[in-house]
Amino acid sequence: MAGSVRFIEPVQTATDIRPYEPTTKAKVVSIEDSLRFVPERISIDDLYTEPMATGPELGHALRGLASAKGAVQDSLDALQRGEWIASDDAMQRVQAMMPELFCCRALGDGFGAVVNALKFCFENAKGGAFSKEQIVAIGRAVERVRAEPFLAFGSAVEIITRLEDSGLNVDPPAFATLTDLLDVEGLY
């Protein structure tokens, strides 16, 4: 039988093979419904659950930033109650965490830039109390870098600009002396 096509029926070799039956059905969603979908944000702690997989710096930084965030909140709460000394004490706890966070700057240029700026904010304050606006700006910077420890340098510049906008000095303390020296010499 030249030119004819023969169909071979499949042979079932095992008795437990069942035909495919889908268990879920696709739902048709309108464009309006899809625009209303807001994905749930995953927390940084859920994202990086295994410290050995991410390296010791990240785990150390996340713990330090969580402590700093809590201390900033303690400072704001004390300020709200009119307890100026307790507010300042909480900010001193944040300052004490900066050298440890500085050791984690290998996480990225953005992380390092924000931590350096925060470190210099405290050094330039020379023990003086921060205003509520400044405490909020520090808290937002800490919260942002904790939520995005691998943030881009451009994002870090935006955070640092907000710190400066609140009246904080983010430049190294020696920078003022250097600019004064260059200005005196007429070179600046």
Image (cartoon, helix red, strand yellow):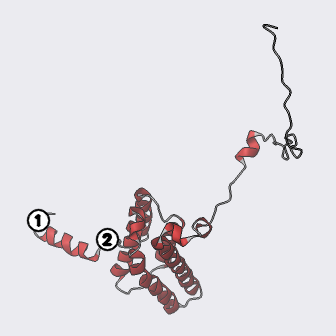
Q: Classify 10 Å Cα crowding around label 2: few (below 14), some (14-19), many (20 and above).
A: some
| Amino acid type for the residue under numbered disc 1 | Gly
Give the residue at x 44% y 70%: 166
Q: Secondary structure at mark 2?
A: loop
Counting from the top left corner in percent of width and height, residue 27 is at 82, 42
**Would residue 133 be seen by someone viewing this image from the given angle?**
no
- Which residue is under mark 1? 186
Q: Nearer the viewer, residue 84 or 42?
A: 42
| Amino acid type for the residue under numbered disc 2 | Asp
Left of 182 or right of it: where is 142?
right
Vertical arrangement, residue 102 with respect to residue 160, above or below: below
Vertical arrangement, residue 46 with respect to residue 37, above or below: below
Q: Earlier in the sequence, mark 1 or mark 2?
A: 2
Q: Secondary structure at mark 1?
A: loop
Give the residue at x 54% y 66%: 147
Give the residue at x 41% y 65%: 160
- Which residue is under mark 2? 171
Give the residue at x 52% y 71%: 52
Residue at the left extreme, as displayed: 185
For residue 96, what is the image quadrant? bottom left
Vertical arrangement, residue 75 with respect to residue 39, above or below: below
Residues under labels 1 and 2: Cα distance?
A: 21 Å
Counting from the top left corner in percent of width and height, residue 36 is at 72, 49
For residue 158, what is the image quadrant? bottom left
Counting from the top left corner in percent of width and height, residue 73 is at 56, 80
